[in-house]
Image (cartoon, rainbow, N blue to C red):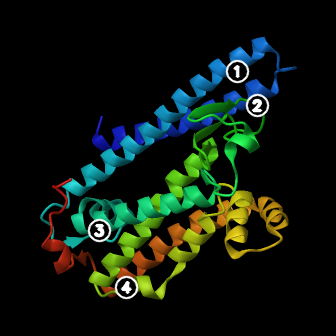
């Protein structure tokens, strides 16, 4: 089996595991006639199975993508130009120190912003968790029921007073998709500037996708976050309104980020016939072989 085939198998099996276990768990919960102590024990065991399969699926996807990027980058070592195609261009960006640094920093920063805005990381300085939620520190609670696939089970963790975590499987998946796409857009923009192609400044949709992406995981939470930051009095009503448009936010965010990559690459293709020359600033730094 070739490396590309192995990478594709890992990605497909990982996606199948995540999707399959999410649907299976939701169906198992829906079929329970009532939640008794016996059913709670079975649900708890099911949540452990779900968590293990979910994490294994995500890990398989990440490893598969990493294997593909590494294999493609090896073929670009020492090259003076890059084929303007996603299969070659993205591995080049992720395997070159200069652009990998921009990708990593922007991915982490946006991921942290996304986690705060969607209330995966909860910080409420005005709320006493002990009084409001009878919390103990540290502690972890699991909500086993009920909802559609990828909305259950949820994990609530109290780390300290005013600080906690609220983990929903769908939020985790969206974080792992949106944040790296934002990082790729930043790396793409830096490369376009280095190559003097002007594509990144001409097509500024990456910022649009990043902002819309804040609402993909939990638009109600993001609405409360923004309205509270602005001092608005209608935060709850605003958040409730946004919750109805979660599919639209999901549908708009990822395509906007992907469209930016396409438009910048098309601009590069127009600027250069054939392969895009590697900018001098990138050539002076360790590249594909140094990962």
Using the numbered discs, state the Cα–Cα distance from disc 1 to disc 4 in whole angstroms.
Answer: 56 Å
Residue at label 2?
Answer: 145
* Element marked by disc 4: helix
Of badges 2 and 3, nearer the viewer stands 2
Tell which circle, 3 or 4, labels the residue nearer the N-terminal end: 3
Q: Nearer the viewer, residue 24 or 119?
A: 119
Pick whichever, 100 or 85, lies toward us: 100
User: Which residue carries the number 3 mark?
Assistant: 99
Q: Earlier in the sequence, mark 1 or mark 3?
A: 1
Give me the residue at 53% from left, 29% from top: 53
User: Which mark is first along the chain, 2 or 1?
Assistant: 1
Q: Earlier in the sequence, mark 1 or mark 4?
A: 1
User: As rendered, which of 161 and 194 lies closer to the eye?
Assistant: 161
At mark 3, the secondary structure is helix
Locate residue 146, reporting x and y percent. Answer: 78, 34
Precedes in sequence: disc 2 or disc 3 = 3
Q: Nearer the viewer, mark 1 or mark 4?
A: 1
Label 2 Cα crowd, 10 Å radius (few <14 / some 14-19 / many 20+): some
Q: Which residue is mark 4?
A: 270
Inter-mark Cα distance, 3 to 4: 22 Å
Q: Is residue 277 left or right of residue 166?
A: left
């Amino acid at each position: 089996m070739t490396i590309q085939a192995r990478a594709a198998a890992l990605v497909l099996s990982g996606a199948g595991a995540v999707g399959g276990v999410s649907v299976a768990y939701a169906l198992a919960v829906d079929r329970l006639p009532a939640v008794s102590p016996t059913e709670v024990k079975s649900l708890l065991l099911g949540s452990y199975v779900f968590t293990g399969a979910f994490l294994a699926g995500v890990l398989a996807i990440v490893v598969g993508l990493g294997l593909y990027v590494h294999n493609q980058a090896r073929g670009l070592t020492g090259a003076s130009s890059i084929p303007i195609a996603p299969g070659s261009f993205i591995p080049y960006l992720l395997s070159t120190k200069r652009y990998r640094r921009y990708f990593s920093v922007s991915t982490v920063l946006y991921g942290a912003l996304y986690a705060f805005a969607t209330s995966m990381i909860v910080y409420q300085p005005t709320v006493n968790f002990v009084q409001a939620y009878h919390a103990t520190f540290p502690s972890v609670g699991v909500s086993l029921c009920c909802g559609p696939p990828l909305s259950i089970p949820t994990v609530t963790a109290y780390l300290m007073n005013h600080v906690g975590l609220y983990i929903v499987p769908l939020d985790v998946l969206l974080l792992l998709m949106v944040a790296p796409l934002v990082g790729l857009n930043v790396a793409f923009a830096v490369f376009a500037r280095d190559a003097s192609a002007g594509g990144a400044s001409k097509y500024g949709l990456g910022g649009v996708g990043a902002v819309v992406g804040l609402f993909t995981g939990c638009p109600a939470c993001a609405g409360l976050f923004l309205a509270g930051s602005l001092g608005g009095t209608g935060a709850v009503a605003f958040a409730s309104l946004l919750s109805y448009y979660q599919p639209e936010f999901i549908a708009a965010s990822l395509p906007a980020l992907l469209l930016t990559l396409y438009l910048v690459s098309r601009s590069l293709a127009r600027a250069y016939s054939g392969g895009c020359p590697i900018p001098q600033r990138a050539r002076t730094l360790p590249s594909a072989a140094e990962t």
